[in-house]
Structures are given as structure tokens and as C-alpha cells.
Image (spheres, grey):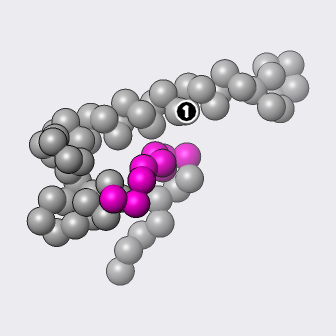
Amino acid sequence: MSVKMCDMFTVPVCRKCHERWHSSLNYRQFCGMGRDESDALIATTQLELMAHWIRMIDPATDLF
């Protein structure tokens, strides 16, 4: 059974990369990258997207 990832931690990828990420032969690996490189790319992208989201919030109102 699969588990849905919280939307705060998702990283948009194309269908081909999504299928490869979840494939049993290449689990958690993007094309041309090993597992550690792929995990690092996802973690870095998650951090960048969250930082971008935080910068969009108005500190005075806590609204976008």
C-alpha cells in the first residue's frame, strides 16, 4: 500500500522521472544519478521550495 506524501514535502517532477523514482529496478534514482545524489537533489529542492514559500508570507499579517 502506498502512502501519500504531505504536500509540503512534494517536489514536482515529470511523469518519466516519477515512474523511475518508484521503479523497483531504480528505486529512488533519477537518470544519471545514484541514490545518494538523487536523495540530495530532492532534499535540496524541498528546502529551496519551502524557503521560497516562507518568503512569500507577509510577516505583518501571516498571509500571502
Q: Position of residue 2 (x, y in %)?
A: 38, 74
Residue 25 lies in the magenta stretch? no
Residue 27 appears left or right of 62: left
Q: Position of residue 19 (x, y in %)?
A: 31, 64
Q: Quadrant of the C terminus?
A: top right
- Which image quadrant for residue 38? top left
Q: Position of residue 29 (x, y in %)?
A: 20, 50
Residue 14 lies in the magenta stretch? yes
| Residue that numbered label 1 is attached to | 50
Q: Quadrant of the N terminus?
A: bottom left
Q: Which residues are magenta?
A: 8-16
User: Quick check: 18 above or below 3?
Assistant: above
In this orientation, which residue lies closer to the viewer: 4 or 26? 26
User: Quick check: 29 above or below 60?
Assistant: below
Give the residue furthest to the bottom: 1
Residue 20 appears left or right of 25: right
